[in-house]
Image (cartoon, rainbow, N blue to C red):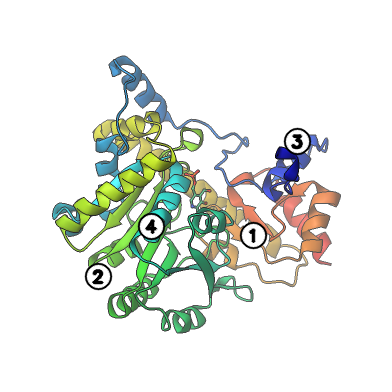
Amino acid sequence: MFDQLDVLPADPLLGLITLYNNDTNPKKVDLGVGVYRDEHGHTAIMQAIQKAEKIHMDKEDSKTYLGPIGVAGFVNGIKSLVLGESSQAVASGRVAGLQTPGGCGALRIGAELLKRIKGEVTVWASDPTWANHIPLISSAGLEIKSYPYFDAETGGIKFDAMDAKLAELGPNDILLLHGCCHNPTGADLSYEQWQQIAKRAAEQGFIPFVDIAYQGLGDGLEEDVKGVRYLSEHVEEMVIATSCSKNFGLYRERTGTLLVQTKSAENAHAIQTHVQDAARANYSMPPAYGGFLVDTVLQDPALRKEWEDELNSMAERVKSLRAGLLEKIQARDIDKDFSFIVEQKGMFSFLGISKEQVRKMREDYSIYMADSSRINVAGLNTECLDYVADALEAVLK
Ligand SMILES: Cc1ncc(COP(=O)(O)O)c(C=O)c1O
């Protein structure tokens, strides 16, 4: 039976890791994989998380099952973090939710929920979007198409073209949005653009599905969710997938939530049973550990402050690397305007160079990035900025 299946092509980003690991050039730079790194290239455990681990270890006296909802306190904490302490939707019991194995688990259970509710729905994703959106959503049986988004000329958003496409959407459409720090482009919607999207969703009846995996890594914890909160206040129904992989550094603990805002507490109760049922049919229950840690951090004022400070300093580091790289580029003989690097938010930027130039960066200078020219800005450090700018100057000649 198994001889019927051929080997699948390797995941391009994972292939890049192997190439990078085998590269003996001491100057090599890894701008490929999307994890936060410190100045030494290390993805450290956050201090507040380390303290929460100790507190949790001392307290935990059982490993018995928790049920498909996961750690209930954690889910409530994330509702407040994303939708705000004073969210009316949350206060009135209109938001169903459960802990999921990472943001990926949330996207998948969200897609399964949409498949259950409506027959023929289409999910609209930005062009480009995070590569994993496509398999996560389409493997739940939903059709996925794209709307215009990134403007390669300016490094910003083609909002007029996007809005013209949104004008065609109706109640059988789902609009997949990145809550902040768009992956892979770093080009985020402005507050006014979020308002326009909310107006269209409310009038035309399409459902926003917000994927937010980088809250706090753009302009700050509150600032990064302004658009999402506006949507929540102005549309009745929406879906939100959150991830604690990046902003709590819990990558391997697989910690996320799926939140579903509905029209009434009664609807939310029904949806709660469905998302739990979908979880049960997939993986039964999420791993609890990450949920306990985040819950501990969010509930303890001192730990929460420590986490917020550390997260802010991570975001500041990325911003200063953006500014540093732009300064180095501008000091060189490079025609292309890279000023979008400081406009874009979060960990990623699209350099907008060709595949051939990406290959040269890798083969001639050991600087690794995705073929699309997406770079993980957090993979830079103050030491390598000159080297990267020199390499860019050479390959752009
Ligand atoms: C846009 C986006 N959504 C969701 C995720 C989900 O991540 P995880 O499943 O690791 O929590 C990621 C991770 O890279 C992402 O970039």
Report, in whole angstroms, how far the alpha carbon at label 4 lies from the one at label 2. 17 Å
Closer to the observer: label 1 or label 3? 3
CB atoms of marks 2 and 3 within 8 Å: no
Q: Tell which circle, 1 or 4, labels the residue nearer the N-terminal end.
A: 4
Q: Which residue is mark 3?
A: 21
Q: Amino acid at mark 3?
A: Asn
Closer to the observer: label 3 or label 4? 3
Report, in whole angstroms, how far the alpha carbon at label 1 lies from the one at label 3. 29 Å
Q: Amino acid at mark 2?
A: His
Q: Which residue is mark 1?
A: 327
Q: Tell which circle, 2 or 3, labels the residue nearer the N-terminal end.
A: 3
Marker disc for residue 234? 2
Q: Quadrant of residue 389?
A: bottom right
Closer to the observer: label 4 or label 2? 2
Image location of residue 219, percent across then percent down? 41, 56
Q: Amino acid at mark 4?
A: Asp
Report, in whole angstroms, how far the alpha carbon at label 3 lies from the one at label 4. 34 Å
Front position in the image: 238 or 195: 238
Q: Tell which circle, 3 or 4, labels the residue nearer the N-terminal end.
A: 3
Is the CB atom of the residue marked by disc 3 within 8 angstroms of ligand 1's nearest atom?
Answer: no
Tell me the crowding category of disc 3: few under 14, some 14 to 19, or many 20 or more residues within 10 angstroms, Cα based.
few
Front position in the image: 41 or 64: 64
Q: Which residue is mark 4?
A: 224
Q: Is residue 36 above or below residue 358?
A: above
Image location of residue 59, percent across then percent down? 28, 17
